[in-house]
Amino acid sequence: MASKKKSAPQLSSSPRTVLPGSEKAPFTQTAGETTAPNSTRITVSVIVKRKTPLKAANRNGKQRLTHAQYKKNHGADPAAVKLVRAFAKEFGLTVAPDTPGPERRTVKLTGTVAAMQKAFGVTLTHKTLNGTTYRVREGSITLPAKLVGPVEAVLGLDNRPQAKPHFRIAGEAADLTAKKAQSGGFAKPHAGAANTSYTPVQIAQIYQFPAGATATGQTIGIIELGGGYKTADLQTYFKSLGQKTPNVTAVLVDGAKNSPTNANSADGEVMLDIEVAAAVAPGANIVVYFTPNTDQGFIDAIATAVHDTTNKPSVISISWGAAESAWTSQSLTALDAACQSAAALGITITVAAGDNGSTDGVTDGANHVDFPASSPHVLACGGTTLEATGSSISSETAWNELANNEGATGGGVSNVFPLPTWQANANVPKPTVSGGGRGVPDVSGDADPTTGYIIRVDGQNMVIGGTSAVAPLWAGLIALANAQNGTSAGFIQSAIYAAKGAAAFNDITSGNNYSGSPVGFTAGPGWDACTGLGSPIGAKLISIVNPSSSGSSKGGKKKPVRKRAAKKSPISKRKPSRSR
């Protein structure tokens, strides 16, 4: 008599265990707490392990992969996906038909709150903060033991806000076209103010971006967790600069929208990012990835941008973040892994280092760094106070206006990510936690709102600062480098931290990023935890990050710089300075 085939044991009856790193802190606001309705349908992102791990990023992307190579070797592990599908079926969850994507490791599951609570061993409640109700979970996620390991993170059960934009408004500027030259050609934000403001074009001149260079053929990706842009504002702004309005495309992730509201909202972040990046890298296409302000949305947006084979960004700018202590371990790991994928694919990610000094706004009496700036796979961008005469720097110090309650550059030492090999000789201070060590930031640029950027937001011309301005500034510079060098710069840290990399920076040696206690960090010769290696000397930086010059890439031949006919700036009333 033929024996019957035994059916596989049900995952639902298997012993459960905690998903490592999933513990979520209690929500700070308890007013208006109610049980989440059982019938409400939600979607979560289940991130599974890679087929094979990625190696650590190396000099200028030696290990650079094509998307096809990445998909073949480092996409989602099929066995892990099979387990998640079986798990979903047993618990009444629906697997999205297009997940995981060709290179993605995210499996999207949809189901009712009741089914999600049972599947992941959590309790979901509704809690209110500042008039907005969020779905919250506290404590850890549990899974059938067989899934722990194959599954690395479960995101989206909780939709509380994860990050903040790192921009600060200094004041309203006059009409750009009516600006008169002051202080060596640079304008002041409003009558009677002692502050100096610049257009992004003027900042590029000061930092010696090559005169007349364009980023034609390059795409700059921008991650936004809220806000929106208005095409009419972009048209007015770039006409005032004497530039062609860039091609801007919105990509909507996880149901987010391009939703401009008012100048004091996240619109200021969105417009700052677009206008700075596009103005300093004329000719570049801009793709804005809008996503909800959750850890799920943040990670999904980065993964979408990194694996976007339609728009193909060669550099991605991020101006949002939060202190490392505000993230779950699973979210830190998952977002860092998405950035590691970017490095492996030859995509540079620039990230604002934060605007709240050495504590990053945490009030526990200790120093903290911002994430994702602390990821070892991104270029962390700190802030300076910049004063210039004409196109020459007269003074540049670490940005610190904490005494005036106006912010300071983030910077310090990660308590999560270890010291990278490329920072081994940078004299990074020791971390307070033994597992940490990665120094932040890597680089810097003008961020002080009192020496801020003239930006148009929702029909108004504002002066805006913050390290949010520095991330798109560096993204624009990398886009110029990619166009000039004929290949993407990719992961640039090893090149810029090498001895010859020092020639590409203005070394910032004065200032600090703290006030009172705890004692933070002070700028000094070489790398420091306020301004990193310093602000860019654009033309030299472009040469330093050229992978072909170091023989570390299979990039294309070097292309000549595309020249534009020089014309006078409608603001500075002078010709662009030539690179020195």
Image: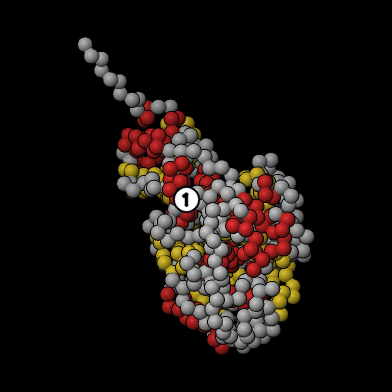
Residue type at mark 1 is: Thr
- Tell me the quadrant of the picture where the N terminus can be found: top left
Q: Nearer the viewer, residue 75 or 105?
A: 75
Q: Nearer the viewer, residue 129 or 551?
A: 551
Name the residue rendered at 28%, 20% in the picture. Answer: 5
- Residue 78: x percent and y percent? 39, 37
Which residue extends farthest top?
A: 1
Q: Residues within 10 Å of mark 1 (few under 14, many from 20)?
A: few
- Tell me the quadrant of the picture where the C terminus can be found: bottom right
Q: Which quadrant holds residue 9? A: top left
- Residue 117: x percent and y percent? 39, 40
Q: Look at the image and name its color scheme.
A: secondary structure
Name the residue rendered at 45%, 79% in the picture. Answer: 235
Q: Which residue is mark 1?
A: 66
Q: Nearer the viewer, residue 484 or 494?
A: 484
Relative to residue 237, is residue 328 depicted above or below?
A: above
